[in-house]
Image (spheres, rainbow, N blue to C red):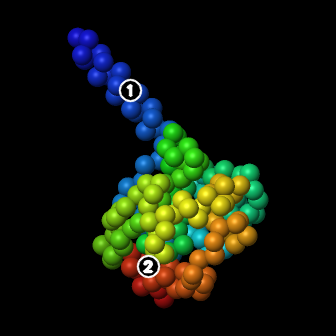
Amino acid sequence: MRLVLAVVALLAVAAQVHARQFIAKDSDFTCIRAWPKVHHTRVFNKNKHRLKVAMRIIERGLPGKKFPKGTILQLWPGEASVKRGGTFNPEGDGWEFFQLKTTADGTTIVDRGVDTVNFAGGECITCHSAAKAYDFVCEHGHGCVELPLGDDVFDSLQTGDPRCPPAN
């Protein structure tokens, strides 16, 4: 009986931790052309109110604002930043970084975590740490190293997202 109670208690604690975090799955990463675009970043959150908050934060670019849990940000289909929240990555304010493989059939998470390596060969958190005042989100003027590709390249990569139906 004690073992059963211990297992029930452990499951209850695990459920509480999980409820305070957004743990992204492959299916959460969909056609980014269907997501709102703010500046050159695609923004998604399953919760419509949280999506509006996230969009306002990027639009205004003011320091000190925190993105809501469950926010997904993408510049191009192969990488993403996700506000996981909870106790995950307290030094990075709950952000998790993703390397993704995208095809017409969907998305596969290739790597995820704090030490995920980006397309340029560096750890995502290394650059994002420079934008701590902006909740670790790199935009022009947030202190991050400028990416070696221009906004036009990211726009083109978004347009060519293989998960999306052909553009008209």
The x, y position of residue 13, in whole percent, is 41, 27
Against 20, residue 82 (above or below) is below
Q: In the image shown, does 117 or 8 lie closer to the viewer?
A: 117
Residue 12 numbered mark, or none: 1
The amino acid at mark 1 is Ala
The x, y position of residue 122, in whole percent, is 49, 68
Work out whether residue 54 can be spotted: no
Q: In the image shown, does 149 or 59 lie closer to the viewer?
A: 149
The image quarter in which residue 61 lies: bottom right
The image quarter in which residue 5 lies: top left
The amino acid at mark 2 is Asp
Q: Which residue is mark 2?
A: 161
The x, y position of residue 48, in whole percent, is 58, 54
Q: What is the crowding at mark 1: few (fewer than 14 residues within 10 Å), some, or many (at least 20)? A: few
Against 167, residue 21 (above or below) is above
Disc 1 element: helix
**Quadrant of the snapshot with the N terminus:** top left
State the residue at coordinates (66%, 74%): 39
Residue found farthest to the top: 1
